[in-house]
Amino acid sequence: MTTTATAPVPAGERTGGGRPPAARTVRRAWTEHGLVFVAPFLLVYALFLVWPLISGVGMSLTSENITGAGGEFIGLDNYAEAIRDPEVWSSLWNTVWFTVLSTVPLVVAGLGLALLAHHLRAVQWLWRLSWFAPYLLPSGVVCLLFLYMIYPSDFGLADQLLASVGLEPGIGWLGDERYAMLSVVATTVWWTVGFNFLLYLAALQAIPAHLYEAAELDGAGAWHRLRHITLPLLRRTTGLVLVLQVLASLKIFDQVYLMTGGGPDDSTRPILQYVYQQGFTGYRMGYASAVSYIFFALILTVSLVQPLLSRRRAEEAAK
């Protein structure tokens, strides 16, 4: 007669049909899936992003005042008022107009600078550093640079450039409604084009060199290689750059606030500055929250465009 030795079962595992206790199950799940490691991030994320988002929605439904007064529940009255407010629509139009004016030159200039930096052989590192360095500057530094060196009347670099080509200087770059938005756009292009340049440069370096070699052997010139190889292979990067640039331009605040203050006559005031004015100078935090969530819905809509377009292109290519 033979006997089979069995390993002793821990006391904690004898209960519940041989299954470990609930606490041990949760601990094992957290350890196996790495939740222990991401828990600090999830805590900070919930504390500084999720909770303010939920709190802001609740605030937009009240008459909350920055002084602590009010706070009564008024439902959707703030949203109804925002939709009827002409200042909201004029500020939103300024934001959209700035986005339209800035997106095209930022994308085209970023691509052009990336092509130059990719093909220039002499001191290549210097060109890359020169074109990307402005993007590293804080917004305050850039705005002060243009305020006191580029746009001052008569002695600014912009007026000196006009005078050098025989045009009349002193047109009021930031004080004239016709030129104020264009001046802010020019500042933004000089400052932020380095980011798009970096994305395009990384995409150019990922294109296989043998494609260009084969095309050159077939007699394709530089223009044909750019048109039939480079630009098609940069299509996804261009889509990414466009979405990121539109989202960044819609959130403009620093340049306008520091350079024009929204003037002249609110012709450059973006929607975020209007939210700031309503909340922190008009003391209407509930109304400012409602306006900001209307703007958030616009940004969310724009951010969903790129995935939908990419999916549609992929479906068409599969057919």
Image (cartoon, grey):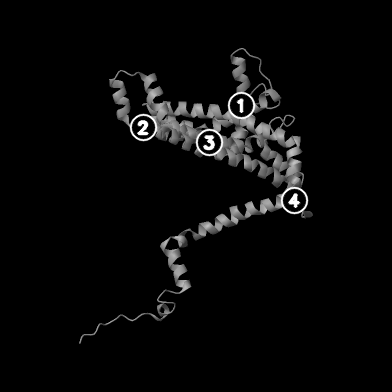
Which residue does the numbered mark 4 point to in the structure image?
A: 75
Which residue appears at 67% of the width and 44% of the height? 292
Residue 110 locus on image (x, y percent): 48, 29
Asked which secondary structure carries label 2, the reply is: loop
Q: Residue furthest top?
A: 166
**In which image quadrant can residue 20 be found?**
bottom left
In the image, residue 72 sits, relative to residue 216, either above or below, namely below
Asked which secondary structure carries label 4, the reply is: loop
Q: Nearer the viewer, mark 4 or mark 3?
A: 4
Tell me which amino acid carries mark 4.
Answer: Gly
Asked which secondary structure carries label 1, the reply is: helix
Estimate the spatial distance between the alpha carbons at disc 3 and disc 2, rounded to whole Å.
22 Å
Q: Residue furthest left?
A: 1
Which residue does the numbered mark 1 point to in the structure image?
A: 150
**In which image quadrant can residue 48 be found?**
bottom right
Q: Earlier in the sequence, mark 3 or mark 1?
A: 1
Which residue appears at 46% of the width and 26% of the height? 112
Tell me which amino acid carries mark 2.
Answer: Ile
Which residue does the numbered mark 3 point to in the structure image?
A: 243
Tell me whether circle 2 and circle 4 mark residues in contact (CB < 8 Å): no
Estimate the spatial distance between the alpha carbons at disc 3 and disc 1, rounded to whole Å.
30 Å
Which residue appears at 75% of the width and 34% of the height? 86
